[in-house]
Amino acid sequence: MLVKFAITNLRARLAERFSIKWEGKEFDPGPLDIELDRTAGTHNEGVLDYTGRRTRAEFHVLLTFPEFASTLETLGVDPELTRPVRAVIRSEGDILGDHSFLLSGPCDLAPHALLNAQETRASVLPGT
């Protein structure tokens, strides 16, 4: 049995710290906020395959670094550097016995003035 679903809301803050290398320097950009990109239309959807006990979803998100953006704005940098990063997350995972699921998969980042496409990778790792 297949059950299609729409993803209608998503707000998350990455709790784990990480570093960014920019202009030859490495630093902590502060928190990473993730929210559903509502301008993507109806492309935020997924399917539950109860026969195969698997689920998959594709959704469009905006990634923001509020502290880092604020610092860059204070320095008077080009506003293109502080705009949200658009991305598409394509994930899948097992459907668990309680009908919950843990999704993981690649996150494809759109071109952005701050990020070098050849050196930037993102993915959603399985939760616990």
Image (tube, grey):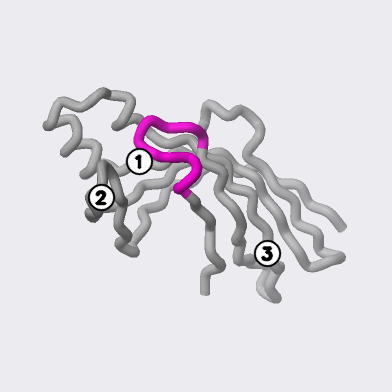
* Corner quadrant of residue 95: bottom right
Question: Dot 1, how many residues are within 10 Å of its Cα: few (below 14), some (14-19), or many (20+)?
Answer: some
Q: Is residue 107 above or below residue 14?
A: above
Residue 125 in the figure: left or right of residue 16: right
Q: Nearer the viewer, mark 2 or mark 1?
A: 2
Earlier sequence position, callout 3 versus callout 2: 2
Task: Determine whether the residue tagged by mark 2 lies in a helix, strand or loop.
Answer: loop
Disc 1 to disc 3: CB gap under 8 Å: no
Residue type at mark 2?
Pro
Task: Determine whether the residue tagged by mark 1 lies in a helix, strand or loop.
Answer: strand
Measured in 3D between alpha carbons, the distance from the residue under mark 3 to the one under mark 2, in whole angstroms, is: 30 Å
Whether residue 99 appears in this view of the structure is yes
Nearest the viewer among 105 and 6 is 105
Residue 63, image x, y percentages: 41, 42
Please tell me which residue is depicted at 61% across the width and 61% down the height of the picture: 103
| Residue 64: mark in rendering | 1
**Which range is magenta?**
110-120
Q: Was residue 114 drawn as part of the magenta stretch in this picture?
A: yes
Please tell me which residue is depicted at 83% across the width and 54% down the height of the picture: 2
Residue assigned mark 3: 93
* Corner quadrant of residue 54: bottom right
Disc 2 to disc 1: CB gap under 8 Å: no
Q: Residue furthest front?
A: 24
Residue assigned mark 2: 29
Residue type at mark 3?
Gly
